[in-house]
Image (cartoon, rainbow, N blue to C red):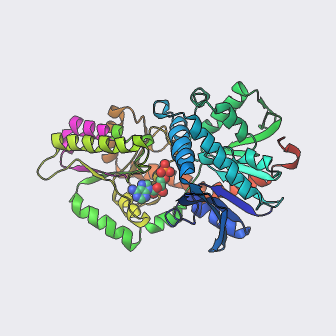
Amino acid sequence: MGRLIGVSNRTAADPNARAGGLAVALWDALVASNGTWFGWSGRTVDEARGIEMFSDGGVDFALVDLTHEEHERFYLGYSNRALWPIFHYRTDLANFDDEDFAGYEAVNHRFARLLSKQLKPDDVVWVHDYHFCLMGEELRQHGFDGRIGYFLHIPFPAPEVFRTLPEHTRLARAMTAYNLLGFQTEDHKANFERYLLEFAGGRKNDDGTVSVHGRTVTLKAYPIGIDVDDFAALAEKDKAREASTRIGRFLGGRELVLGVDRMDYSKGLPQRFEAVGRLIRDYPDLHGKVSYTQIAPPSRTKVDEYAELREQLDQLSGSINGDHGDLDWIPIRYLARSYTRDELAGLYRIARVGLVTPLRDGMNLVAKEFIAAQDPHDPGVLVLSHFAGAASQMPEALLVNPYDTHEVADAIYRAIHMPLEERKERWSAIDKTIREKDIYWWRQTFLHDLGHIDAESDLPPV
Ligand code: ADP
């Protein structure tokens, strides 16, 4: 296998992205193959320039700036106002704009042109996420015949929902230019497969691949993981203990129910606040005994729906606290800021309940981090949405419908009162799974499969 070329919107050249799962996973593989990480520099500029190349820690980076217009159309526009909501089933929030799509196509095209100049025939290209659905086809058109894999980090929706995108035909066709398409869950994979078979004239082959548009593509689920040992070790570090101690002082012996999410409408935060409100109404014995702390730093604040969500959360927490709080008790504490990974690990560890209730999520790494950070002798309980990709790997969590505030409230109550033996059993089953399917398994399995696809015989026509 030749060099690995990673392609993603944000790269580990950005210190803020360096600790994330993708950075950890790709880094070693890039170092080992003398590979290159290609993506956006994180800068927006008046006029597009070429590629910026540099090396850092054994990895070569090839970064490209976005113009202000490209950032608006490609990133904020089509990626985050059309693809993100539709792939998370929010047809009500999607904004379809021809110029946004034109901007999306133009960036995929320009990036592919710049990247194709760097490629050697035996390079293996691994493209990530919804920003670059068109990249594979663009690279083919620029003459690259080698292996190209694609991993979608967010859900792939049911075909009925995907087809609401005016450009669904174009997008799906371009996605079949990849040799291997990876999804977070079997359900997401099945959704794309069903789209290809029912709406794109595809045919399923005996070996499981799909032939469509004169190409053959392999679809497979690869649930992304974390480095469990690394995260578990973080939870024992001084910074983590400090965070545990600080919140412990605030708790004063109360049980901690903890949520940690980017502030995003896919995370179901208003529904979660409502569920906690119901918990407090339905179970007066918990008054003064629990504290729900939600950590949710604002993200994508330039997209209107995100600013509105912030207001909604301020209002909801204010009204629940106003109704139920007391002189010495605030039921909901909501911190709109981010914490370091060490601090988060310390907070997870001291929590009795981890509340992870997205309305829709590709995987949800917070669920895995929460499990990894627990004390095996006294673990907390994970309350997890059915609609997080992680649920497909964690039947031992308390699985809930995040829209059903009764069910979520009852699950929190059950978690708070769960006997130690049951907590240990559930926790160790999930811990075993996330250790088996960790971030290194994810990377190795994907790259192994990509390396074993006979790209030459399946060359897609351009
Ligand atoms: P998403 O990718 O949609 O944000 P995930 O749960 O898969 O959701 O990944 C989120 C990552 O961001 C996790 O690694 C988590 O630790 C981190 N994160 C989430 N909220 C915060 C926060 N408030 N402060 C710092 N890191 C956070």
Q: Position of residue 290 (x, y in %)?
A: 24, 49
Q: Position of residue 131 (x, y in %)?
A: 60, 47
In this rendered view, identify the residue nearer to me: 234 or 458.
458
Residue appearing at x 31%, y 40% in the figure: 312
Q: Residue furthest right?
A: 457
Work out whether 76 lies above or below 120.
above
Residue appearing at x 57%, y 64% in the figure: 12
Q: Please identify the quarter of the rendering in which residue 78 is found.
A: top right
Count the labels in the image: 0
Task: Write the start and end of the magenta stretch as one range.
Answer: 273-296
State ligand 1's quadrant: bottom left
Residue 294 sits inside the magenta stretch: yes
Q: In the displayed structure, does residue 10 sit left or right of residue 312?
A: right
In this rendered view, identify the residue nearer to me: 276 or 430.
276
- Can residue 365 be seen here? no
Residue appearing at x 27%, y 53% in the figure: 255
Q: In the displayed structure, does residue 264 sit left or right of residue 72?
A: left
Residue 303 sits inside the magenta stretch: no
Q: Position of residue 446 (x, y in %)?
A: 70, 53
In this rendered view, identify the residue nearer to me: 250 or 294.
294
Q: Position of residue 328 (x, y in %)?
A: 13, 53
Instruction: Tell me the quadrant of the picture where the C terminus can be found.
Output: top right
Instruction: Tell me the quadrant of the picture where the N terminus can be found.
Output: bottom right
- Can residue 299 be seen here? yes
Work out whether 168 lies above or below 35.
above
In this rendered view, identify the residue nearer to me: 443 or 233.
443
